[in-house]
Image (cartoon, grey):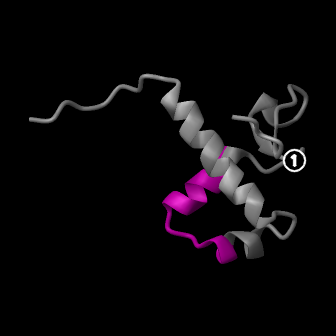
């Protein structure tokens, strides 16, 4: 999977994945969605973003989680 809107620059935002070189981390976008914000609300909050930025942030996050084993609580 190729990501054209996600950038990583060690000299910007501590090297965390950001959207198109902007100082908007992927984690911020994913967090806003998990908090229940709509795409329209996010775009109003960050006018430099585009709809495809949000979709690619979600694809990037999904791929990042797919590649790792995360500690989860065991079901009882």
SS state under label 1:
loop
- Using the rendered view, name the quadrant where residue 7 is placed: top right
Assess whether residue 47 is covered by the magenta stretch.
no
Circle 1 packing at 10 Å, graded few (<14), some (14-19), many (20+), is some
Name the residue rendered at 87%, 47% in the picture. Answer: 20
Q: Position of residue 11 (x, y in %)?
A: 91, 28
Taking the view exactly as shown, the residue that stands out farthest to the front is: 1
- Is 59 placed left or right of 69 in the picture? right
Q: Position of residue 17 (x, y in %)?
A: 75, 37
- Tell me where the magenta segment starts and ends, as one range: 27-41
- Using the rendered view, name the quadrant where residue 53 is placed: bottom right
Name the residue rendered at 15%, 35% in the picture. Answer: 75
Whether 73 is drawn above or below 31: the answer is above
Give the overall secondary structure of the magenta segment.
Answer: helix
Q: Position of residue 49 (x, y in %)?
A: 82, 63
- Using the rendered view, name the quadrant where residue 41 is placed: bottom right
Name the residue rendered at 53%, 25% in the picture. Answer: 67
Q: Which residue is mark 1?
A: 20
Name the residue rendered at 50%, 31% in the picture. Answer: 66
Image quadrant occupied by the C terminus: top left
Whether 50 is drawn above or below 15: the answer is below
Q: Position of residue 37 (x, y in %)?
A: 56, 70
């Amino acid at each position: 999977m190729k990501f054209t809107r996600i950038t990583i620059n060690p000299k910007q935002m501590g090297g965390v994945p950001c959207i198109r070189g902007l100082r908007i981390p992927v984690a911020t976008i994913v967090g806003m969605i998990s908090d229940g914000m709509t795409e329209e609300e996010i775009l109003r909050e960050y006018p430099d973003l585009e709809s495809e930025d949000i979709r690619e942030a979600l694809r990037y996050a999904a791929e990042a989680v797919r590649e790792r084993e995360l500690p989860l609580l065991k079901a009882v």
